[in-house]
Image (cartoon, grey):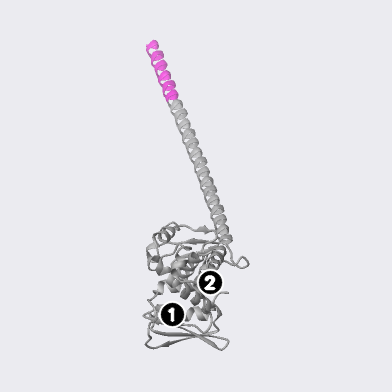
Amino acid sequence: MPPSSDVVDTLYAAHVRRATGALRLTFRGRESRLLLQDGALVGAELGFGHQSVNQALVRGGALKLNQLDALWARGAGAAPDPDLKEEVALPEEALRDVPLLASLKRVAALAEEVELVETAVDPSREPIPGKRWVRALFERLPDPEDDEPIAIRCADADACAPWVEDDEEFEWLESLETFTPQESPSERRRGLISVLAREGLIEILSVAEWERQQEEARLAEEARLAEEARLAEEARLAEEARLAEEARLAEEARLAEEARLAEEARLAEEARLAEEALLAEE
């Protein structure tokens, strides 16, 4: 279940304002508090929505259920990092952040009300930058019932850099100069997509709408080419008609010139014969 828009808006605004204080979220009379310092997440007091490291890793796909079973079998199912490091390919810092980020998502999804109380806070852990916890807020597993395939376009990958966590993500954004369908993006990738869409840094269309626009563009291009061909044919026929008219006029001029020359020759011959006749009479 995704968080309500009010919860998302309040948490997102706290990040944008680089707020310091406690985000108080309530659910059925219980309260959880997320502690922020300059927009970074520096602790939590959870009255609901708590997620253990194992729950978080299983939900995020970093730990398989059979791996968890194996950990429990050797008595390490609830063990801290040293045991989990053997099972998951995550750096220590990421592994440390996993349960709090998972709890953040769970708390936000359950919360009925949220309030930011701006006050000094006592950090209880290393800060998780706003970029990371806000992205986690938007992460969710795909829901086959309501998730429609999407196509994405990113006109300016550099503008997305503040939200990008590694080179692979940046290269992916650079590849989206034109609308590109996305097949089953990961939970992490979905979080990035949601944040970038909220920031207005990417454009998203359903694949069905993208395909409709592609078909419209194809038909428009076909119509443009057909119109170009029609105009070219009209121009060709007009040029043929012009050349035919030029040839007709040239032929008329040639025949007129021939007639003129013939008439001149006839008159000259008549004058010669008349001259001969006059000389003969003399």
The percent coordinates of residue 238 (x first, y second) are 50, 42
Start-end of magenta stretch: 261-282
Of residue 118 and residue 64, the one placed in the foreground of this image is 64
Q: Pinpoint residue 120: horizontal percent, then vertical percent.
A: 37, 87
Q: Position of residue 254 (x, y in %)?
A: 45, 29
Residue located farthest toward the right when viewing the structure as drawn: 145
Q: Position of residue 79 (x, y in %)?
A: 48, 71
Residue 210's mark?
none
Q: Determine if residue 200 is in view.
A: no
Q: Is residue 222 magenta?
A: no
SS class, disc 1: helix
- Amino acid of disc 1: Ala
Q: Quadrant of the N terminus?
A: bottom right
Residue for badge 1: 13
Q: Nearer the viewer, mark 1 or mark 2?
A: 2
Q: Residue at x 43, y 19 (%)?
A: 270
Q: Earlier in the sequence, mark 1 or mark 2?
A: 1
Q: CA distance from mark 1 to mark 2?
A: 28 Å
What residue did someone put label 2 on? 55
Q: Nearer the viewer, residue 254 or 191?
A: 191
Q: Residue at x 40, y 11 (%)?
A: 281
Tell me the quarter of the image containing the C terminus: top left
Element under disc 2: helix
Residue shown at 57%/55% (left/top)?
A: 215
Kindly tell me whether residue 101 is visible in this rendering.
yes
Q: Is residue 280 magenta?
A: yes
